[in-house]
Amino acid sequence: MGSEPTGVMSTPATVALVGRPNVGKSALFNRLIGRRLAIVEETPGVTRDRLYALAEWRGRTFSVVDTAGIDAHADRREDGATDQIAVATRRQAEAAAHEAALVVFVVDAQTGRHPLDDEVADILRRTRRPVVLVANKAESQSAAATIDGEFTRLGFGSPSAVSAIHGEGTGDLLDRIVEALPAELPDAEAPGELALAIVGRPNVGKSSLLNALLGEERVVVAETPGTTRDAVDTLFMWHDRPIRLIDTAGVRKKPQAGGAIEYYSALRSLNAIARCDIALLVFDAMVGPTTQDRRLAGIALEERKGLLIVGNKWDVAREQGEFQQAELIEVIHDQMPFAKFAPVTFLSAKTHRRLGSLMPIVAHVCENLDRRIPTAQLNALVRDAILAHPAPTKNGRVFKVLYCSQAATHPPLFIFHCNDPDLIATSYKRFLENTIREHADFEGVPLTLEFRSRRSDDEKHGA
């Protein structure tokens, strides 16, 4: 399966943004993760409206979770009935606070302290989680001047004054978040171990696939705590290689509200992707990929993980469907054009039909993660491609590649030393990536192409 994965993985801590409605949690969420989204804004299929994302600050990576506003009275309708949506919303936010390593309690500096803020504070005190208090919308001097005494009485110390819309104070807030997070503990990982995350929407057969893999191999060697208190990682051997299956399937402490099930599936998937080498994106072959599936695929590629797309329940789809596998694969690639290089396979976890083909594909993607192109071959390949298809000019200037090299594997990183990185168009970057893919087998593997100017290289070497 190629060389051993490098480095030691660790589980990102979860930071939950909690507060009453309309205090600006979503705006703060977007501000906190804005740097990360800016890195991948050219990646098709990665939308900006998801409620969870990874953020990085001062070398620390953590998950940020945006929750719906907690309104303790919203479930009391005028007719005396219970508002199930409001109940589900409050449960989701409360549960997110319970699951988080750190809670960011957001209040509104413009409107001041509200009775609902006190009720949210009571809820957070019961979670016994560390809390960072944040007063958002502190754009004006008058709002910023009054927040300390007014909100300190909530019992969580002095609030950080921020303006999520304008970005003011968010750097100091991130400093507080990183300082308050618990120490980062590495996951137990054996040498040469390959981590597979089984991700996807609820009820597509993720747990069935995990059980099928373990039942067929029958060589479970250990169970260790996983990303949440009610999930486990499972280790088994495949062809003398230790495989860690990161299970995101089971919501064993089942929330009462259906929306929360989808919500926690997404959170577990995010953490699992961050910890894995290869993500197995499982979807229902009877339904096809959904928006949530496309988001998960985008996150896996954004995190530079290997990706394998698995259509489960193929036995039912084959009996009732009118399409062949090749036609379905074409449809999937049309729906997820940013992941066309990811292999697609169909199986039935229930009947084990085509189950035996899965792990060889995983092994192949693992080999591709560690594939390296010799520098001389790479430069000849790129030179010939540019001669055959020169880059378009920009303001009369021509983009030129001086030389290139593959700086890393797992995943592959290619460095292009050029005259000016600003001259290269996004379409030409895709052309160079496709050129490399046509030359070498990188199926299932995201490629990173980094462009550096000659001037910056000279400065790094003190020239």
Image (cartoon, rainbow, N blue to C red):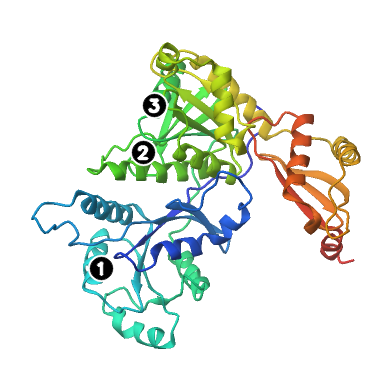
Q: Earlier in the sequence, mark 1 or mark 2?
A: 1
* Residue that appears at 61% across and 31% down: 342
User: What separation in Å lies between label 3 and label 2 (alpha carbons)?
Assistant: 16 Å
Q: Residues within 10 Å of mark 2 (few under 14, many from 20)?
A: some
Q: Is residue 3 left or right of residue 183?
A: right
Q: Earlier in the sequence, mark 3 or mark 2?
A: 3
- Indicate the amino acid at tag 2: Ala
Residues at marks 3 and 2 touching, judged by CB atoms closer than 8 Å: no
Q: Earlier in the sequence, mark 1 or mark 3?
A: 1
Residue 285 badge: none
Viewer-nearest residue: 72 or 188: 72
Q: Give the answer, above or below, for where 15 lies relative to 247.
A: below
Task: Read off the residue under disc 3.
Answer: 205
* Residue that appears at 45% across and 17% down: 314
Task: Read off the residue under disc 1.
Answer: 121
Task: Read off the residue under disc 2.
Answer: 231
Viewer-nearest of discs 3 and 2: 3
Q: Is residue 49 visible?
A: yes
Q: Is residue 397 left or right of residue 6?
A: right
* Residue that appears at 39% across and 88% down: 142
Name the spot of residue 115 as percent of width and height, x first: 21, 73
Q: Give the answer, above or below, for where 368 lies relative to 396.
A: above
Q: Is residue 377 left or right of residue 105?
A: right
User: What separation in Å lies between label 1 and label 2 (alpha carbons)?
Assistant: 29 Å
Q: Secondary structure at mark 1?
A: helix
Name the spot of residue 354 as percent of width and height, x first: 50, 14
- Indicate the amino acid at tag 3: Gly
Name the spot of residue 376 as percent of width and height, x first: 89, 38
User: What separation in Å lies between label 1 and label 3 (alpha carbons)?
Assistant: 39 Å
Viewer-nearest residue: 173 or 321: 321
Q: Secondary structure at mark 3?
A: loop
